[in-house]
Image (cartoon, rainbow, N blue to C red):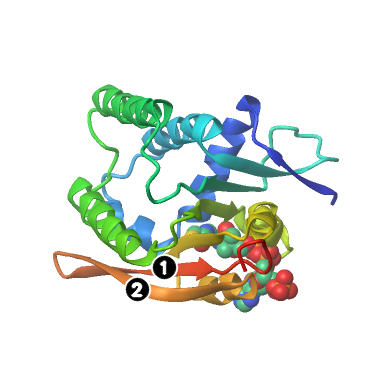
Amino acid sequence: MPVEITPIKHEDIPGAARCIQSAFSSDPYFKWVFDPSNYNKNRNISSLTLRCEWGIRNALFYVAKDTDSQEPSRVLGVSMWLPPKSANEPESWSSFLGSYLLWFKQGLLNVQHLGRGGLIYRRYQIWKRSQAEAQREIWTDPNGYYFCNIVVVHPKEQGRGLGRKLMEIVTDQADKEGRRCYLESSRKEPNVEIYGKMGFKVLRRMICEDDGEKCDLYCMVREPLQGDRQ
Ligand SMILES: CC(C)(COP(=O)(O)OP(=O)(O)OC[C@H]1O[C@@H](n2cnc3c(N)ncnc32)[C@H](O)[C@@H]1OP(=O)(O)O)[C@@H](O)C(=O)NCCC(=O)NCCS
């Protein structure tokens, strides 16, 4: 099957949202942060769609597609990366506005769906606080980090090299610029080993705990293989 990695287009968003949802359905973080008895799959797709729309404008955002497929909207994998920001670079107005609009539209979804679709908001906030603390501690490079915010391969397509391709499109760029990359994974096995093969190393564990239930995340950094800075 000939697979192409391309920047996402608007018409890819429904396929990308479905791919993210199916790949994350067994993710430990997903299981910790959503209440299965209240989980609303459609509400979750709407939320992922908003996130993808935000990503088109604000992130380095790619999809993997089978170029021979009869179904052109079928997305096999997705990666969304936040570009590096230097330590002393203030947030731009467009980035601030983009985040505000995303927050506002997520609020409208809560109204339309009469709730958060099973998201345990208290746990989401615990995670956000832990994430901010981990990144403050780890992100010491003044040149900033390429942050892999989402990488997923559809469960039926995993283990065929798509994940590596979705990562390398940005890690190759990071190598050319001599920059570090960063990601967080809540799945130790096999992800820590998979990302290890792509050059990432665990720097810290992030432990989120609520009501006796824990979610461990692995914060991983990749050093550039080459670049002007070295
Ligand atoms: C993690 C994920 C993105 C990796 O994508 P993938 O397409 O399955 O991975 P690849 O086939 O490109 O494999 C990359 C490398 O890991 C190795 N690998 C793949 N699966 C592995 C496994 N189960 N155990 C050990 N190594 C494995 C491959 O051999 C390859 O190594 P090589 O290129 O040095 O030969 C994908 O499995 C996934 O979407 N998982 C579910 C969602 C998820 O956990 N997302 C990440 C959240 S942080």
The image shows residue 42 at horizontal and vertical percentages of 41, 34
From the viewer's side, name the closer residue of 20 and 57: 57
182 or 224: nearer the eye? Answer: 224
Q: Residue at x 26, y 27 (%)?
A: 107
Whole-percent x and y of residue 117? 29, 38
Question: Type of residue at label 2?
Answer: Arg
Q: Is residue 158 visible?
A: no
Residue 154: x percent and y percent? 62, 53
Q: Quadrant of ligand 1?
A: bottom right
**Residue appearing at x 14%, y 64% in the figure:** 211
User: Which residue is rendered at x = 42% and y = 26% of the image?
Assistant: 94
Q: Neighbour class for label 2 at 10 Å: few (<14), some, many (≥20)?
A: some
As measured in the structure, the alpha-carbon distance from the residue carrying label 2 to the one carrying label 1 is 6 Å
Q: Quadrant of the C terminus?
A: bottom right
Q: Is residue 97 above or below residue 3?
A: above
Please tell me whether residue 108 is drawn above or below residue 44 in the rendered image.
Answer: above
| Disc 2, SS | strand
Tell me if I can see residue 76 in this picture: yes
Circles 2, 1 touching at the beta carbon (< 8 Å)? yes
Residue under label 2 = 205
Instruction: Return the mark for residue 154.
Output: none
> Who is closer to the viewer here, 37 or 198?
198
Q: Quadrant of residue 137?
A: bottom left
Residue bearing mark 1: 219
